[in-house]
Image (spheres, rainbow, N blue to C red):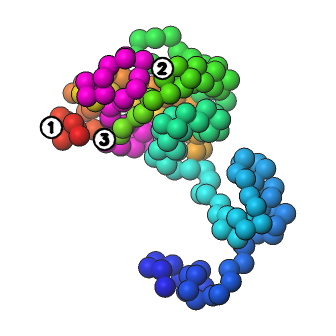
């Protein structure tokens, strides 16, 4: 039996599991979420918690960025989503941000965010980390030394803001991130 799973849900306790929803419900959910299903996949289809908790939404957003999945990014944005990168002008609206991310993912397909710390307070999530493959054009061994802070505001499981800040003691304090720089470099 699986630890933490009730006997009626454990695969070893029942030879055949039945889907929790009807086939039609699963197909409709698949159409709404964009998840592909097949007859064999329907038995294993699970529904994620909705809305996503703030940290889960941000982790999903970073995962989409790391995979260059612009469609996935847009599903995690509010209609009025804003992108604010350092001192650059804001990018406002889901469509404008989708276009911006498509351009960035196309231009820098090796871009990856590496989170070191994540904090959350009242729907505002801060991520301290580094990147590789960015527009900076640095070798990875140099780029990993440059830490930044991403700040997301999450409403009902979707990001309304994705902001990039320079790493600083004041910003770390403001967002509840550890001041210990020695623990940050991986």
117 over 168 or under it: above or below: below
Q: Secondary structure at mark 2?
A: strand
Q: Which sits in the foreground, 107 or 181?
A: 107
Expressed as whole percent of the image width and height from the top left, the position of residue 141 reads 25, 28
Assign the C terminus to one quadrant of the image. top left
7 over 40 or under it: above or below: below
Q: Which residue is mark 3?
A: 116
Q: Which sits in the foreground, 30 or 173?
A: 30
Tell me if residue 178 can be seen. no
The residues tagged by marks 2 and 1 sit, at their Cα atoms, a distance apart of 28 Å
Residue at left 54%, top 26%? 105
Expressed as whole percent of the image width and height from the top left, the position of residue 80 reads 63, 26
Which mark is in front, 3 or 2?
A: 3
Expressed as whole percent of the image width and height from the top left, the position of residue 49 reads 59, 57
Expressed as whole percent of the image width and height from the top left, the position of residue 139 reads 30, 23
Verify whether residue 173 appears in magenta. no
Q: Which sits in the foreground, 36 or 155?
A: 36
Q: Which residue is mark 1?
A: 182
Q: Earlier in the sequence, mark 2 or mark 1?
A: 2
Q: Secondary structure at mark 3?
A: strand
Q: Earlier in the sequence, mark 1 or mark 3?
A: 3
Question: Which image quadrant is residue 122 in?
Answer: top left
Residue at left 60%, top 50%? 51
Q: Is residue 8 left or right of residue 20?
A: left
Number of numbered markers: 3
Q: Is residue 184 left or right of residue 32?
A: left
Q: Are marks 1 and 3 in contact (CB under 8 Å)?
A: no
Q: Which residues are magenta?
A: 117-143
Which mark is in front, 2 or 1?
A: 1
Q: Which residue is mark 2?
A: 84
Verify whether residue 125 appears in magenta. yes
């Amino acid at each position: 039996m699986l630890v933490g799973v009730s006997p009626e849900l454990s695969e070893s306790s029942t030879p055949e599991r039945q889907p929790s929803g009807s086939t039609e419900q699963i197909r409709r959910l698949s159409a709404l979420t964009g998840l592909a299903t097949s007859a064999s996949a329907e038995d294993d289809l699970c529904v994620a918690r909705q809305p996503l908790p703030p940290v889960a939404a941000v982790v999903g957003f970073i995962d989409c960025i790391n995979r260059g999945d612009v469609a996935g990014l847009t599903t995690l944005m509010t209609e009025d989503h804003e992108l604010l990168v350092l001192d650059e002008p804001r990018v406002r609206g889901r469509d404008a941000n989708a276009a911006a991310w498509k351009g960035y993912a196309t231009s820098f397909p090796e871009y990856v965010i590496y989170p070191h710390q994540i904090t959350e307070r009242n729907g505002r999530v801060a991520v301290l980390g580094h990147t590789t493959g960015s527009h900076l054009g640095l070798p990875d061994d140099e780029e990993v030394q440059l830490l930044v802070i991403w700040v997301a505001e999450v409403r009902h499981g979707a990001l309304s803001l994705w902001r990039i800040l320079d790493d600083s003691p004041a910003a770390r304090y403001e967002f509840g991130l550890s001041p210990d720089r020695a623990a940050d470099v991986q």
